[in-house]
Image (tube, coloured by chain):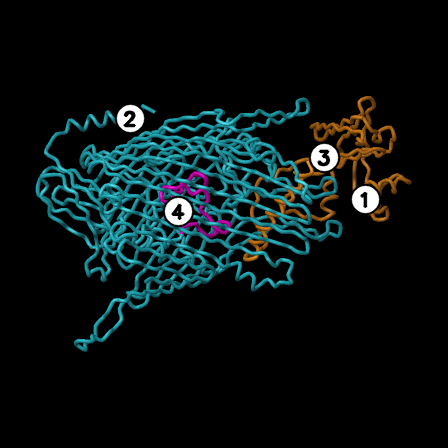
Amino acid sequence: MKFPFHIFLFLFVSFGVVSQEKYTISGYVTDGRSGEAMIGAKVFVPSISQGALTNTYGFYSLTIPAGSYTIEYRATGLNTKAVTVDLTKDIVFDVELGTDLQEIQEVEVNAKKGENINSTKLGQIELQIDQIKTLPAFMGEVDVIKTIQLLPGVSSVSEGGQGFYVRGGGPDQNLVLLDEGVVYNAAHLFGFFSVFNVDAVKSVNLIKGGMPANYGGRMSSVLEVNMNEGNNKKFKFKGGIGAISSRLTIEGPLKKDRGSFIVSGRRTYIDVLMKAFIPDSSPFSGSGYYFYDLNLKLNYKLTDKDRIYLSGYYGKDMFTFGNKDDDFKVDMPWGNGIAALRWNHLFTNKLFMNVTTTFSDYMFSFGSQQDEFRFALKSGIRDYGAKVDFSYFPNTRHKIKWGLDYIYHSFTPTSASAEVDSVVFDTGEAQRLFGHETAAYVLDDFDINEKLRVNFGLRYSTYAHTGPFTRYIKGDLSTPDTSIQYSKGDLIKFYQGLEPRISLRYLLPDNSSIKAGYSYNYQYVHLTSLSAVSLPTDIWYPSTDKVKPQSGYQASIGYFRNFKDDKYETSVEVYYKGMNNLIEFEEGALPGDNVNDNTDNILVFGKGWSYGVELFIKRTYGKLTGWIGYTWSKTERKFPDLNAGKVYPAKYDRRHDLSVVAGYKLNERWTFGASFIFATGNTLTLPSSWYVQEQSLLFNYGDRNSTRMAPYHRLDLSATLYDKAFKTKTDKLTGEEIQVKKRFRSNWSFSVYNVYNRANPFFLYVDNDGNFLSGDFKITVKQVTLFPIIPSVTWNFEF
Amino acid sequence: MELRILNVRQMKKLLLFFILLFTMASCTKEVEIDIPGYQDLLVIDGSIETGQPPIVLISRTNDIYSATNLQAYLDGFISGATVTVSDGTTSIVLDELCTDNLPAGTEEIAAAIFGIPAAELVNLHLCAYTTFNPAMFGQVGKTYYLTVTYEGKSYTSITQIVPLLLY
């Protein structure tokens, strides 16, 4: 634990040498309309070409030599503010942007101008929620994760799915954070909708490579979703009524300019719609599906130096299926609960601290009843976490961060219960696993000279698997089954590792730069999946004495160049990734095999690698905005116990992946959006031959994932019609007609999914029918397509 | 054990529901897709039961898109293999017999073995390696060794007829 702090001390001492008359200007940048913190606003001093960006909480700190300066504050979509300061002592200066009347006109300020060239960020993309909202939405539900899937290097698990793969890593290797709380299952409705209600979301940031040391615990990526804080000036209502769901958001001040709240809720009504189609007399009546979710956030400025934030999410899916003819009924609820309490404190105007405590819960359960037999299966994960992060801004050349992170995990991979006529079966005790995950890190974002900037960091992480735990050891013919019991608190296995992270940026002429990065990661939790699609039945499983932590590295290099006054941002990135201790179920494993056994007894371990090239062109402002992303990649796996030990392609190994996203603002009333994707088909394993044994037809499977589905391609279109922003009123005093800004605003959003009705493959299976003896027997390969062309309309309002 | 089987059955039903749910909004069509990895393998299907002669059927795996009718299956029979069954003490080489050319008086036995009426069976060219020597009919408690030699390669297998335990 001491090790990283030594490095920190070393850095600290080296700064002490620099002694010049320097002062600090610091403060918070907020959006003047709502009082919310501006994330990533630019604070820039043109005369010395130095600046800083605000952090997640809107805080900035800039230490520059004494003198008189004009300081510019810029944020995308808001008016730039310039202030003149005489810096002869430390100054605290809070800024509100975009409050003046000119706000009516669309302000095209690209605050992050040149930031993609300038920063050490490699493989990072930030998305504005406003931009996401104008893109075509599936069934009218604007979706953060589906938009992420349109970026190069990111692909979806399956049609409409929420699971995503980043640069060949599995869906469990993405750290999804909602206000720093970990989201274990970001999907509703078997993955067709994300848990993120866009009305409650402020910004989305994806890190797919060159992960800085302050993030860890996952190997592939970080998806940071920040929730809106709520308007601290006035009450606002927002909502939408769509084809399958509706949502409502209320926000307002707790105390003006000091604190605010936001509550946002959403519910689908597929169950209500389904009722209309299933008559009461039908054996399937009572079957249905719905989900709802709630977001809540409170923030309060205790003092000028202390702020607290409370964020909460609760969402639940409920699927019921009944067949009265069969006297059969299934209930399947699942859901997430996330809570995060954060406290920001400013020790000095150069030292910022954030303390976070988080709670995260994911539960899936399955209950069935047939006649007198009742059966229930539960699976879940619960985390309690605490962390502390420090940001130190000694001068404009360094930005130093360090912190500690702790999570207490409790996993219930499977807990089963069964009874017949109130006779309870012994299903063995619920398998539960407990673990302590800790990490410490330090990093410095350092301008070595005018051209070279380096972000280097080190993370040290540990994982302790502790009791109570029962290890079942399967016997064979000669030895009986045995088990080892560990009691509460016993240390069963301890893992630890160092995770070095580095990324470099070297500025080149012509508004371009070259960047390179290397990161090493450990991951102590795993997701095991029996099916090719992401289902809620996937089980989270921690590291144990038998399951080693996943580990891996990624090396990447990229060239970034902007054209036409940063109107076009382009980049080329190449990456290579190696992964160890990946897990899969052994061949032929079935759900329920792990009852009265350790799930890891039916797991197998192997490694994987992935490499690729990503091309990205983005048009950042103007009437037409959007991007084109293309990825060429290869992702392979090698497991000694799968596919006879031979290398095989991962199921989401995609050679080509192209996405084109465009938004066009015709005028003040109409905005259009389009997205097109083309991707190589996913792989799967199908039988390559048939034979007859014991009078039955049997199949012999070919190599794992050797069959490739037809390519996936789809075009979606959208149009949004806004109401008029002004209404004409007659001034009572002068009798003149004046334009008054309306308080109530609304828009109609139209979307068409899969415009040319492409029958994309969802999965394939081998079917047979006919009679073998009569000669009309036939084996066929069938392709299931999920969604045809789907138009939708949503009405949104705000007042 | 019984419980476990039920779990699996329930879980299979669950997976069925997912498919059902998906198919509610989906469509299914037949596709011709390249399925690589076809391997031409020998399929040896041998059985022996109490009081019954050993029967060994030898065929090959068929490409998934190949014709799947009875004729294709019958044509797939491999003749010319040397099939030996031993009970540890006695060893017998099985005869290659086809149902359209059965020794007189054995039609009914063959019909019972294949589960096809004798009248139909004699019209089929269904071939198998077997014996009518009662010395090699299955006996409880005995262990049987099967050896198949074909195109210079040998394949072996062991089975045992275990006594039925009554609790």
The x, y position of residue A707, in whole percent, is 54, 43
Q: Is A706 in the magenta?
A: no
Query: Quarter holding the C terminus of chain A?
Result: bottom left
The x, y position of residue B41, in whole percent, is 66, 36
- In three-dimensional space, the C-alpha distance between marks 3 and 1, rounded to whole angstroms, equals 19 Å
- In three-dimensional space, the C-alpha distance between marks 2 and 3, rounded to whole angstroms, equals 68 Å
- Subunit under mark 1: B
Residue marked by disc 1: B115
Tell me the mark number nearer the camera, choosing from 3 and 1: 1
Q: Amino acid at mark 1?
A: Gly
Q: Secondary structure at mark 3?
A: strand
Residue marked by disc 4: A312
- Subunit under mark 3: B
- Subunit under mark 2: A
N-term mark: 3 or 1: 3
The x, y position of residue A701, in whole percent, is 61, 40
- In three-dimensional space, the C-alpha distance between marks 4 and 3, rounded to whole angstroms, equals 62 Å
Q: Colour of chain A?
A: cyan
Q: Amino acid at mark 4?
A: Gly
Q: Secondary structure at mark 2?
A: helix
- In three-dimensional space, the C-alpha distance between marks 4 and 2, rounded to whole angstroms, equals 33 Å
Image marks 2 and 1: residues in contact by CB distance under 8 Å = no
Q: Residues within 10 Å of mark 4 (few under 14, many from 20)?
A: many
Asked whether the residues under marks 4 and 3 belong to the same chain, the reply is no
Magenta residue span: A169-196
Q: Is A176 in the magenta?
A: yes
Taking the spot 67% from the left edge, 45% from the top edge, the residue there is: A373
Q: Colour of chain B?
A: orange
Q: Amino acid at mark 2?
A: Phe
